Amino acid sequence: MKGACLLLVLVSASALAASFTDEEVRKIQSHGPWPAPWSRDPSNRVSGNANATDLGERLFFERRLSVNGDISCSRCHLPERNWSDGLPRAVGIAEVDRNAPSVVNVRYHHWFGWDGAHDSLWAQSINPILDARELGMSAASVARFIRGDRDLSCRYRNTFGAAPGADDEKVLVDAAKALAAFQETLVSGSTAFDDFRDALARGDGAAMARYPENAQRGLKLFVGKGACSVCHTGPAFTNGEFHDTGIPFFLRRGEADPGRYGGIKKVLSDRMNLLGPYNDDPKRSTAVRTQHVSLEHRNFGEFKVPSLRNLESSMPYMHNGSLASLRDVVKHYSEISPDRLHSDGEAILKPLHLSDGETADLIAFLQTLSDRGGQYQRRPFPEDCR
Amino acid sequence: MRALLAALLAAASAATACELPGGAVQKIQSGKVLVLYRTNPAPLKVGQHFVLEFAVCPAPESVRVDAQMPEHRHGMNYRPTITGSGEGPYKAEGLMLHMAGRWELVFEVRSKDAVERVTQTIRLE
């Protein structure tokens, strides 16, 4: 194995602007291949089901799924904006306190929302439907809407094997499971970085040389001096966990966003969590995180590590959308003051003191994590459900 | 001299009696305490939950398992549940190392008169 890694470095050396150590090569390899293997969600009995995906896609763009009949999920998750909205804080019926996270690649996540207040994609999908500032519906109004719409009711029956019944909460959860089945299909495409990573794996010098030199130098910073890959791990560039990165978490005078601290409390008290009655997996095989998650004081002000795939089109950044550009994000980590972090928090973040050239290189690398677009084409919806 | 020989024989006897059925066992000795363990899956990966099977000799009153990143000044985000008693075998479920870097796996072994921290370094990329 050691020999193989050494070989990779030797083969690649002539094609690279930056030279990579064995350890750096292993780290680069750990960010692929992409797309990562996909598997259905065992907690959702209609995950991977074509009828559910179809129903979920319709519901996702359905404005009547809001209390004022004017807002759909796609208000804050626009396909052309990497399934986010470009705003610092999302606006449904009213403005919420956090940035709308992209729903691309959500099948690879374990915790959902900036605070991880939900442990499945279907449970997360319920949240905006019921939140008074987002879609403002209730279980009763969702169930009434689906039961009363001939087409949606028919598609519900085709998906779940029976017409929507009298149990409002069950219809709401099923609608969320269909929404999850659709969102699971949103996977970003391969990128210039993936081409480089794969070329490095097979020792293809010519293909490696096509990767821009400044991106190569930025990649070396990412896995080396910058230590970015400590948290932005794996093919999705996130460890899926939560950290305090020194972003202020005060919302308004006298009010703070508790972040992960509040998220853990919410998920553990949520009837819709993976330990509850709506998990379709009798083995509870994906509930291990929920069973063992530990609430610590340090969780206050921690927020989820976002995926970096398609980063360029999901600005602004951070949980509150407070950083407008990639340059602002890199500057934040370059100049971060340890004094802004919790005294009982992690001691990993230190100012990187990047030069102008290093900043430009790191941005150039981050830009190569975006796909070429065109992955999603909204289909016309025929109205002939039988 | 005779006392030393007796102590050595006793320690050797404890060590030979200590066992964890199954293969691929790691050993850690700290003072008088011997811990045998293995992880499933192995090797460990960042962000992947794992099960720890272990035995402790001599039999403790209680044992706790934790993992920490000393340089980062934090532990795991998950609290394992442990089943087993005596010398074991024990089973700890729900552990997960969520970042790359140096972790310290800690067995806190409590006996009648002392608490021994038995540690093992694990490096994750």
Image: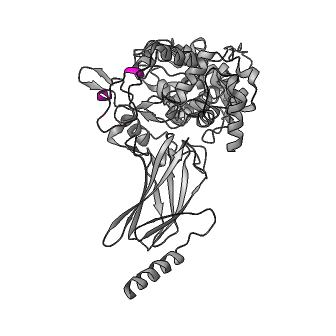
Q: Is residue A103 visible?
A: no
- Position of residue B118 measured from the top left corner of the image (x, y, whole percent): 42, 61
Q: Quadrant of the N terminus of chain B?
A: bottom left
- Position of residue A284 measured from the top left corner of the image (x, y, whole percent): 57, 48
Q: Is residue A304 visible?
A: yes
Callout count: 0
- Residue nearest the observer in this picture, A169 or B3: B3
What residue span does the magenta drawing correspond to?
A334-350
- Position of residue B86 measured from the top left corner of the image (x, y, whole percent): 45, 73
- Residue nearest the observer in this picture, A287 or A6: A6
Which residue shows up at 59% across the image and 55% down it?
B40
Most common secondary structure along the magenta stretch: loop
- Residue nearest the observer in this picture, B40 or A52: B40
Q: Quadrant of the C terminus of chain B?
A: top right
* Relative horizontal placement of residue A345, taking residue A34 as reference (left or right): left
Which residue shows up at 45% across the image and 78% down it?
B11
Which residue shows up at 32% across the image and 29% down it?
A338
Q: Is residue A267 magenta?
A: no
Which residue shows up at 74% across the image and 21% down it?
A207
Question: Which quarter of the figure has residue A105?
Answer: top right
- Position of residue A8 measured from the top left corner of the image (x, y, whole percent): 70, 33
Question: Which quarter of the figure has residue A17?
Answer: top right
* Relative horizontal placement of residue A173, taking residue A338 as reference (left or right): right
Considering every residue shown, the one lying at the far bottom of the view is B2
